[in-house]
Image (cartoon, rainbow, N blue to C red):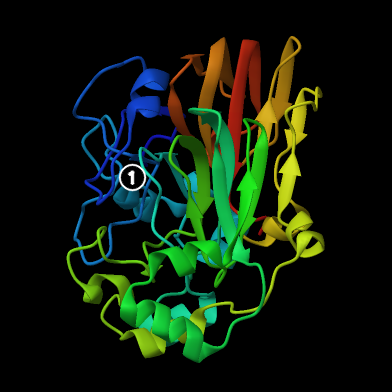
Amino acid sequence: MSARPEPVRLPANQPPQFYRGGEAIAALRGHPGSAEFGPEDWVASTTTRFGRDTQGLSLLPDGRWLRDAVHADPHGWLGAGHVAAFGDSTALLVKLLDAGQRLPVHFHPSDAFAREHFDSHFGKTEAWIVVGTGGPDAVVYAGFREAHSAGTIGEWVRGQDAPAMLDALNRIAVRPGDTVYIPAGLPHAIGAGVFVVELQQPTDFSLTMEWRDFLRAPDEGHLGIGFDTALAALDRSGWDDDRLRGLIRHTADHDSPTVDLLVPGAAGFFRADRLRPRPALALAPSFSVLVVLDGTGTLRTEHGAELPVTRGDTLVVPHAAGELELTGETTVIRCRPPRA
């Protein structure tokens, strides 16, 4: 019988990307000034970059891909209820994302669209937990301010009219503690200097309307299905302030030991909490990904394993670790898949 899986501290995992960034990730992890750090750190990833065999996967200290370890022991890693609902998929991808430049206007497919066009059980709904900002003008962009016709949007994409695309979106100022939920289909972008912990479904399906100056060719923008097909997955409706409030939470001033970070609509895709033990927190068994934002502490399992944690650590926790106790003067983001 194989050994019961225990919590594991993971090294940085930064597959190459098309945009600049990564200084905030380097600083969090304690490697300031490293030129090798990229803008995305894929934490506890069982997901590969689109079209790649292994790029993006997390490697465990014993030399196995996390994907293979989970496949070999899904009940130990994920729990029986999760396996009944999602099979041996973790149903979650967590990233540290540090935008060194504004990201292009893009969107992601729904589950139904991904099944039809990418043969995938999962689309790519996501959420951002803002953990840092650089400069006085930290913004993200989400949803069209008013509805637009398919013809108008098609013209923007064919002409690569980036100013028109960006101007059509809601511009949202953000600060650490803000969270933004991005349902599938919603057009969006992240502004330069915004550092987030991103939760998403476990795919790499990005349909990029604004590909010029970012991607090498338009085929990379529509992932080979053509823009006419890809744009059918786009939410072209208008998002006024009332609708936007349903996507955004402001949690910086919430002082509870455990703070639910995301809007209720996100729970069907993933869950995230901010943890500050005072002096200890008990955590129910679950597959989870931990990102330590500051301080130091200790993570104990119900089986007696003990792991020190400190600022910049990222950990993957299997369901089989059982009930956990987190102690210390620390702030931790706990990311979990949807409840089975």
x and y, in percent, of residue 66 in the image:
33, 45
Q: Secondary structure at mark 1?
A: helix
Q: Quadrant of the C terminus?
A: bottom right
* Residue 5 x %, y %: 43, 35
| Residue 142 horizontal/vertical position (percent) | 59, 59
Residue drawn at 49 percent across, 62 percent down: 166
Name the residue beneath numbered marker 1: 66
Compared to 274, does 306 lie above or below? Answer: above
Question: For this rendering, which residue is in front, 107 or 96?
Answer: 107
Q: Name the foreground residue: 337 vs 4.
A: 337
Residue at horizontal 68 percent and vertical 26 percent from the top: 275
Q: Please name the amino acid that badge 1 sits on.
A: Leu
Point out residue 27 in the picture as x, y percentages from the top left corner.
38, 19
Q: Nearer the viewer, residue 176 or 192?
A: 192
In the image, taking residue 150 as reference, residue 63 lies left or right, namely left
Q: Residue at x 38, y 90 (%)?
A: 228
Front residue of 140/44: it is: 140
